[in-house]
Image (cartoon, rainbow, N blue to C red):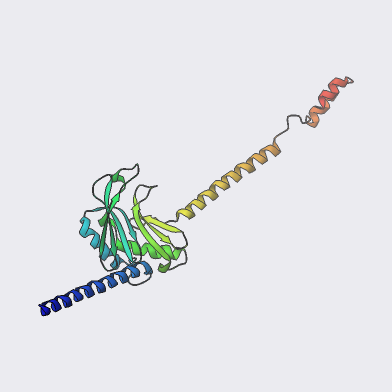
């Protein structure tokens, strides 16, 4: 009996040690995921790493699965996927060690599902990596300065696109194929400058018109005034009227 209890005790200790080590490794991976920098070789901003994580998502939703949003961080990704329901979806968080965490998603808002999803097989990881580098370069920064990347349907165009967010609070975006990269902030500044230029032009035109237009109460031209005075003769009232 004593020997059996001893063996069971050793097994229990080994199991406890196993789960303790596993827990420590999991905690380390979680910490590494949060602290990972965009320029790190293990970063999800790199096409090969992102492809591995997307394969994990495909295993859950299928190659023909449709996504509501894909959020890419240096150390992990989060994917919100459609279940075909207008009010329920699924969310997957893929850690850098490949672990998959699942969560339900509640869908809200006035839109319809079909207008807010895009096929997972349309996400080109090489395009994502390329845009991350280009956006950082536009701001004279590096991949370490990219905070995250979002792939989703753009609210203003209704088409899926890729947005790259930087630590300086700015972001650049492009279509899903990487074309038409632009900065909404820069576009807004340009539009406002155009509006101000138009307003300035209208103000200048109004000022010019006011300056050149004859006043209602101005005196008559010289030739007309001479003729008027000649016709008035000595009639004071008529003379006065000529000068009004």
Number of on-image labels? 0
Report x, y in % for residue 88: 27, 48
Q: Is residue 22 left or right of residue 189?
A: left
Q: 178 and 172: which one is in front?
A: 172
Q: Is residue 96 left or right of residue 206?
A: left
Residue located farthest toward the front when viewing the structure as drawn = 1
**Quadrant (top left/top right/bottom left/bottom right) for the C terminus:** top right
Q: 111 and 34: which one is in front?
A: 34
Tell me where residue 74 sits by quadrant.
bottom left
Report x, y in % for residue 44: 32, 66
Tell me where residue 217 sits by quadrant.
top right
Taking 202 as reference, is 94 above or below it? below
Taking 199 as reference, is 16 above or below it? below
Taking 241 as reference, is 138 above or below it? below
Q: Residue at x 30, y 48 (%)?
A: 106
Report x, y in % for residue 137: 44, 65
Residue located farthest toward the right when viewing the structure as drawn = 234
Q: Is residue 135 left or right of residue 7?
A: right
Residue located farthest toward the left when viewing the structure as drawn = 1
Q: 70 and 154: which one is in front?
A: 70
Q: 21 and 217: which one is in front?
A: 21
Report x, y in % for residue 123: 29, 58
Residue located farthest toward the bottom when viewing the structure as drawn = 3
**Quadrant (top left/top right/bottom left/bottom right) for the N terminus:** bottom left
């Amino acid at each position: 009996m004593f020997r059996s209890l001893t063996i069971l005790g050793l097994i229990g200790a080994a199991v406890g040690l196993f789960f303790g080590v596993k827990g420590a490794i999991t905690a380390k991976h979680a910490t590494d995921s949060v602290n990972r920098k965009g320029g790190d070789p293990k970063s999800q901003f790199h096409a090969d790493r992102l492809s591995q994580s997307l394969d994990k998502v495909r295993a859950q939703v299928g190659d023909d699965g449709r996504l509501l949003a894909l959020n890419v961080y240096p150390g992990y990704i989060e994917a919100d996927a459609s279940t075909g329901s207008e009010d329920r979806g699924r969310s997957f968080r893929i850690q850098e060690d490949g672990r998959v965490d699942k969560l339900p998603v509640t869908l809200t808002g006035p839109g319809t599902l079909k207008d807010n999803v895009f096929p997972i097989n349309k996400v080109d990881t090489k395009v994502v990596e390329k845009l991350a580098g280009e956006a950082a370069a536009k701001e004279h920064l590096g991949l370490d300065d990219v905070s995250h990347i979002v792939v989703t349907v753009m609210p203003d165009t209704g088409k899926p696109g890729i947005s790259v967010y930087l630590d300086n609070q700015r972001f650049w975006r492009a279509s899903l194929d990487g074309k038409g990269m632009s900065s909404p902030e820069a576009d807004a500044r340009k539009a406002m400058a155009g509006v101000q230029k138009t307003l300035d032009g209208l103000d200048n035109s109004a000022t010019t018109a006011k300056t050149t237009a004859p006043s209602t109460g101005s005196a008559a031209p010289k030739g007309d005034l001479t003729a008027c005075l000649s016709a008035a003769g000595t009639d004071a009232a008529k003379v006065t009227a000529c000068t009004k």
